[in-house]
Image (cartoon, rainbow, N blue to C red):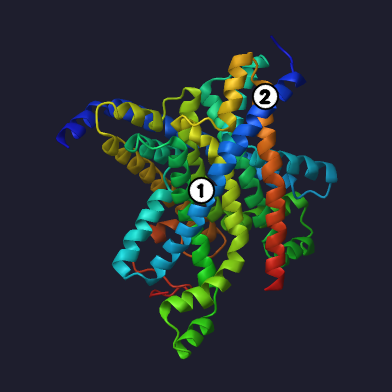
Amino acid sequence: MGDNFDALIGALPMVGEGVWITVQLTIGGALLALVIAVALGLLARFKNVVLRGIARVIIEFFRGTSLVVQLFWFFFVMPQLGIELPAMFVGILALGLNYGAYGAEVVRGSINNVPSGQWEATTALSMSSTQRMWRIIFPQAWALMIPSLTNLLIQLLKGTAIVSFITLTDLTYATDKLRNSTDTFFAYGVSLLIYFLIAYVLTLIMNALEVQAKHKLGRGESLREALSFRTPRSADGKAGIS
Amino acid sequence: MTGLQWDWTMVWESLPDLLLKFVEVTLLVTILGSIIAAVLGLIIAIARRSAPKPIAAVLTFIVNFIRMTPIVVQLLFAYYLFLELDPVTIGVIIFGIHYSTYMAEVYRAGIEAVPDGQWEATTALSMSRSRTWVAVVIPQALRSTIPALGNYVISMFKDTPFLIAITVTEMVRAALVFGGNHFTYIEAITTAGIIFLIASYPTSLLIGRLEKRLAFSN
C-alpha cells in the first residue's frame, strides 16, 4: 500500500493535469449546454410552426444520436470537410450540444410549469412578451429547472470520461497511466473518488444556486443566511424550527 | 479537400457490418443490461426500505457513489480487475449495475406512491412481509414506473458506445474501423448515428404516450 501512495505522489502532476482537463471540459460543456438549452427551449415554445419545428428537429437529433457518435463526427468527419478543430473544442462542442438538447426539454417543461396566474398577470399589466419572459416567467422557471439541470450536469461530468477516445489526456486517461505504477484497485479507486468529489462539489454549487433563485422570488432564506450557523428562520420569518 | 463528399455506395457497403454489430453487441448489451438493472434496482429499492438504518445508509452511499461516477471508468476498472472475463460480459454487468442505481430511485418513488391504506390492509389481513411485497405493493408500484424505466433503457442504449473503452467492437467502433479502411468517415459514422436515431426516437415517443395514458387512468 505504501508503494501505491509513493507512486501516486510521483504521478500527482499528471493526475492534476488530467483533473484540470476534466474540469475544463465540464465547465465549458456546461456553459455551452446552458446557452443551447435556453435558446432551444424558448424556440420550442414558439407559435410559429417553422421555428418550433427547427427546434424540435435539433433537440431530437442531438438527443437521439449517441454522444460518442457526435464526438466522433466532429473529430473525424469535420477534417474530411476541411474543418480542423482542436480536440478540446470538439469535446466541449459535443458535450454542449448533446446535454444542451436534453436541457432544452427541461427549460421548455419548466417554463410551461410556471402557474398560469403569473402569465395572466403579465397580460393584465400589458407587459411586452420579452418583458414577460425575462422579468416574470423565466426567473420562476429557473428555480424550477435547477434540480433537473443538476442531474444533467452530473451526467455531463460523467460523459467527459470518453474524451480520451479523441486524444485528450483527461482524468480517465491519467488513471490508465497511473495504473502502470500502482495496482488496478488503487488507481481506479482514487480516480472514482476524485470524480465523486467533483460531482459532490458541483451538486453543492447547484444547491446554492437553487437557494439563491428561490430567495430572489421571495421564497426561503438568502444564500448567506442558509450558510450561516445562526438558528434557521421559519417560513413566516420568526426565528425557530421551520 | 473541401466540400461535402457523400458516397452512397459507402453507406450500403458499411450497413451490413454496422447492423450485424448493432444486433450482436449493442442490442444484446442493452437487453441483458436492462434485465440486470431492472431486477437489481428493485432489490436495492426494497432493501433500502426494509434493511436496518445503518445498513440502509451504507447502501445509499454505495448507490450514490456508483451513480455519480462515470460508467467508462467503472468499465475500465472491472476490465482490468477481471482480465480473464470477456469484455462484453463485463459491459453487460457494469451497465446493469450502473443503471440499477437509477432504476432503484424510480422504484422508490413508485413504492412511496402506494397508499398507506394498502400497507395497513395487509397488516389487518396478517399477511407475511414477503407476501405483502409480492402480492400487494410491487404490482401497484410497478405500473407507474414503466415509462421511467423505459427512458433509462434508452439512455443505456445510447451509452453502449462507451464499450469502445474496453476494446469491444460495437456499432460505432465498427463504423470507425470501416472509415479507417476506406479513408472516409462521413458515411459510416453518420449511418451509425442515424441507426441510433431510428431505434431510439420511436421508442421514446411510445414511452411518452404510455406515460400520458398511465397518468390519465390514475
* Residue pictured at 58% horizontal, 63% vertical: B145
Tell which circle, 1 or 2, labels the residue nearer the N-terminal end.
2
Q: Which residue is mark 1?
A: B33
Residue type at tag 2? Ser
Residue A222: percent from left, percent from top: 46, 59
Q: Using the rendered image of the protein, determine whether residue B120 is visible from the camera's viewpoint.
A: yes
Asked if the residues shown at circle 1 and circle 2 are in contact, with their CB atoms under 8 angstroms apart, the answer is no
Residue B65, compared with residue B41, is above or below; it is above
Residue A65, compared with residue A136, is above or below; it is above
Q: Chain of mark 2?
A: B
State how far apart marks 1 and 2 are (Cα). Answer: 27 Å
Residue B69: percent from left, percent from top: 41, 44
Q: Is A54 on the left or on the right of B92, as rendered?
A: right
Q: A128 and A13: which one is in front?
A: A13
Considering the image in quadrants, where does the C terminus of chain B appear? bottom right
Residue B32: percent from left, percent from top: 52, 48
Q: Is A61 on the left or on the right of B163, as rendered?
A: right
